[in-house]
Image (cartoon, helix red, strand yellow):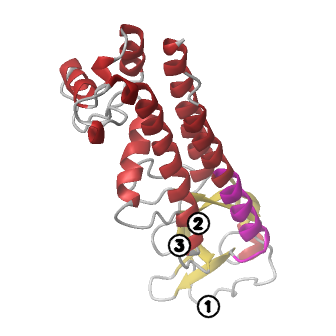
Amino acid sequence: MALEIPLLRVEWAEEHIRNLSRASDALFASGAYGLVVAENSKAQQRRLRIVPYDPLPPHFGLRIGDAIHNLRSALDLATWEIVSPLNPRNPEQVQFPFVKKFEGPQSLERAIENRGINLASKNIIQAFRESRPYDGGNKDLFGLHILDIADKHKLLVPAITILSINKLDLGAIDPGNMPNASLIGGRVRPNKEGHLPFFWTFKPGSPPINQNAVINASFGIMFDTGLHFDGEMVVPTLVRIATEVRRTIDHIRSAVT
């Protein structure tokens, strides 16, 4: 059994991921987002902030949802191609055996039986077992399942994060208060207002911020708070999930032949 259609679904998901990556790169290369110093006069505090910190365009969430749905469907199609010729009692129940709440090996065995996979050969059943499609098992496969459910109820709009801050010289920006401070940063996660976890106090009557100082930073998109893979970068995570789905289907296919 070639399982060609499920693998085509994986390829289609990978195309969505590539398009998402290109759209993300183009957005941030356009200069649509920047990094500035925001001032809170009442608290006498200055801090770094992303501007503007508006939600990303909806098409980003749509692209993520398309990739996730195709990867999830690829697993279901692979299961259907294997089980449907075996005349399962409940064809409408045939799908990949994700376990909603894992309570030991018997949970997976029940899912395998409920999905009709128990009608297949021992090697195929073992291949499904080895996929460990439950919380605490295969993180990427189970996370795919959870994201697919979430996408049915709301748009999976990612959040913006700072991938790097390149040799930020705070002394040049705020010479009256940060004469010797510099920053070379890795990935930094802003809060809901777009503020970064870098702040300092300033003295009343101190010189204003040097608005001509250049702040170089690169941006990317991450899964937002409350989502599975919270805080992980979207594109690399989707690439990793797609690789795992392809590996799982290949493993099942090898058990068929």
Residue 109 on image: x %, y %: 23, 21
How many angstroms separate mark 2 from mark 3 (CA)?
19 Å
Which one is nearer the viewer's eye here, 36 or 118? 118
Determine the residue positioned at 61% across, 81% down: 52
N-term mark: 2 or 3: 2
- The answer to which quarter of the image holds residue 32 is bottom right
Residue at the disc numbered 1:
205
Assign a secondary structure to mark 2.
Answer: helix
Quadrant where the N terminus sits is top right
How many angstroms separate mark 2 from mark 1 (CA)?
44 Å
N-term mark: 1 or 3: 3
Residue at the disc numbered 3:
194
Q: Is residue 26 magenta?
A: yes
Which one is nearer the viewer's eye here, 227 or 217? 227
Determine the residue positioned at 55% across, 14% down: 254
Q: Amino acid at mark 3?
A: Gly
How many angstroms separate mark 1 from mark 3 (CA)?
27 Å
Assign a secondary structure to mark 1.
Answer: loop
CA neighbours of label 2 inside 10 A, class few (<14), some (14 to 19), many (20+): many
Q: Is residue 70 magenta?
A: no
Contact between marks 2 and 1 (CB within 8 A): the answer is no
Report the magenta residues as a range. 17-32
Residue 40 on image: x %, y %: 51, 84
Q: Amino acid at mark 1?
A: Gly
